Amino acid sequence: MLSVSSLYRSIQTELGAWYDAYHRPLPWRQAVSAYHVLLSEVILQQTRVEQGMGYYHRFIEAFPSVEDLAQASEDEVLLLWQGLGYYSRGRNLRRAAQIIVSDYGGELPRTPEELSRLPGVGPYTRGAILSFAYDLPYPTVDGNVYRVLSRLFALSDPIDTPAGQRVYWALAEALLDRQHPSRHNQGLIELGALVCLPRRPRCGECPVGDYCEARRQGVQEQLPIKQGRTRVLPRYMNYFLVRIEGEGGTRCLIRRRQGRDIWHGLYEYPLIESGEEPLSVEVLSETKDFAQLIACLRSPRFHPVPLATHAHRLSHRQIYASLFLIECAGLTSTPDYQVIAEEEQSSYAFPVLIQRLLDKIR
């Protein structure tokens, strides 16, 4: 029976050789820089590689350097981010770039303490930058690594509790190949992405399968363990496409979302929410918010049948959206709204939910 140190060395050796032979040629691995790593890791948070690849290329084209990103406006960043979700990531990425330029001369820091100052850079991204970009001996644990470690060592500690996460980070630290930390960390991530899949793992292709305790016990698909799931609540959102006809063409009303709610900083049409219960059109048209909207319009004509409806799932919310049409001859006032030409809408970053509604009516 192997000692713990011999087991760890064997896993490091087999994993490293497998990674060298089979890793995907992802663009941020081809031209490795700390900026490319930061950009790719922030984009890939909560996003699959296949989906994030196009966004990565578009960001690199628009902002080739961290200085370019630091000089961009928030609207420019959010417009490119449109469709990725979790828009705070985009805002944090821009703010991090500004700190990197102003405080570190355009070069990402090389210590965990300094990286922790950057908005949106948590333990995983911090470890990824230090190991991937600088080949420094720091562990990093994402969803793939949780899965690989839980199966490799048959761990029953829940991955969604602070105590369980401490166990996995301590194990990742102990298992780390300190001679080749970049290859090792990316090898664990790649193993989870390509072989140690959430369902139907390809155990016959696993380079460390001979050391896998979950495989020996036949419990691969029961791991990792989560303590509980987030309750998903419904949310009903009623949007109004207000079309203003005039000699200058068709215009519409939009506004930027404020506060700490979802999609903060993005643009939307006038909105009336009805909480966790749907409202009939008759009740909706009698609300105070609807009356205030109508009062802003001259000769309004409300169409009670929605132009489109769409169901949109977030991690903790199931959103049911409807898009109604209001036509009018002009405005009496425009509190909280911008008036734009309808053809200019593509220049504004809308939530993907509104894009889906517009796709349906087109």
Image: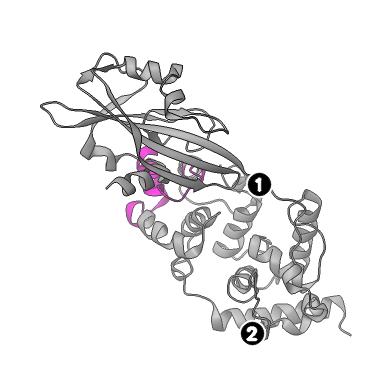
Which residue is painted at 22% across and 30% down in the image?
Answer: 251
Left or right of residue 301, residue 9 in this image: right
User: Which x, y percent locates residue 160?
Assistant: 73, 52
User: Which x, y percent locates residue 145?
Assistant: 67, 65
User: Which x, y percent locates residue 30?
Assistant: 45, 71
Left or right of residue 83, residue 144 in this image: right
Q: What coloring was used for the rendering?
A: one colour
The quarter of the picture where the N terminus appears is bottom right
- Report the front residue among 286 and 71: 286
Which residue is painted at 36% across and 38% down in the image?
Answer: 75
Magenta residues, as a range? 61-90
Q: Residue 258: which numbered mark, if any?
A: none
Secondary structure, magenta segment, majority class: helix
Q: Secondary structure at mark 1?
A: helix
Q: Is residue 75 shown in magenta?
A: yes
Name the residue beneath numbered marker 2.
205
The tag earlier along the polypeptide, 2 or 1, is: 1
Which residue is painted at 49% across and 58% down in the image?
Answer: 40
The amino acid on which the numbered mark 1 sits, given as a three-letter code, is Glu
Q: Residue 113: which numbered mark, if any?
A: 1
> What crowding class fits label 2: few (fewer than 14 Cα within 10 Å), some (14-19), or many (20 or more)?
few
Q: Is residue 208 shown in magenta?
A: no
Above or below, 338 relative to 210 = above
Q: Secondary structure at mark 2?
A: helix
Left or right of residue 17, residue 108 in this image: left
User: Which x, y percent locates residue 36?
Assistant: 46, 59
Residue 212, by quadrant, is: bottom right
> What crowding class fits label 1: few (fewer than 14 Cα within 10 Å), some (14-19), or many (20 or more)?
few
In this view, the mark in front (2 or 1): 2
Left or right of residue 352, residue 164 in this image: right
